[in-house]
Image (tube, rainbow, N blue to C red):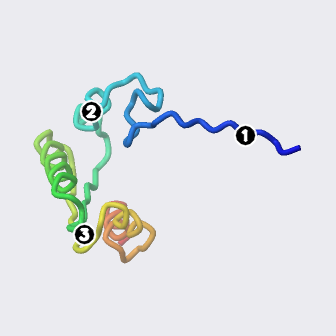
Amino acid sequence: MQPRFEVDVTPKPAVDTPASVGMVTSAKTSSPRRHIDRLGAPLIVAYGTCETPEFQRQARDFAAAVKAAGKPVDLLVGAHYAHLELPETLCNPNGLLGAAVLEQMCLA
């Protein structure tokens, strides 16, 4: 006898929203921009030139808000990098993010 499998065919939202993943806090209250005053360490904000214009704008705006609050921030632009490619440079001491972190730690 074959085992029976039940399949959930309920449509899921295209993008996980806080409600769909069981979160009760709203995106507005959990936005990093609302917590800039709590920053206690230098920040590196980076975006790639192959990211959407909206991702690029958000990165620039956030870095500007951090700077306006008097907090240390470096804004880096990765030429020819997309959103999911940029973090890979963190693993390379000569990569955009890897070099920036080492410099921030005075290890470059």
Q: Secondary structure at mark 3?
A: strand
Q: Is residue 107 above or below residue 55?
A: below
Name which quarter of the figure residue 82 lies in.
bottom left
- Mark 1, Cα crowd under 10 Å, few <14 / some 14-19 / many 20+, is few
Q: Would residue 2 be found to the left or right of residue 19 on screen?
A: right
Q: Would residue 3 be found to the left or right of residue 46 on screen?
A: right
Name which quarter of the figure residue 39 lies in.
top left
Which corner quadrant holds the C terminus? Answer: bottom left
Residue 104: percent from the left, percent from the top?
Answer: 32, 61
Q: Are marks 1 and 2 in contact (CB under 8 Å)?
A: no
Q: Are marks 3 and 1 in contact (CB under 8 Å)?
A: no
- Determine the residue positioned at 28% across, 26% down: 29
Q: Secondary structure at mark 1?
A: loop
CA separation, marks 3 and 1? 47 Å
Q: Which sits in the foreground, 15 or 40?
A: 15
Residue type at the position of mark 2:
His
Q: Which residue is mark 1?
A: 5
Query: Which of pointers 3 and 2 lies earlier in the amino acid sequence?
Result: 2
Q: Which residue is mark 2?
A: 35
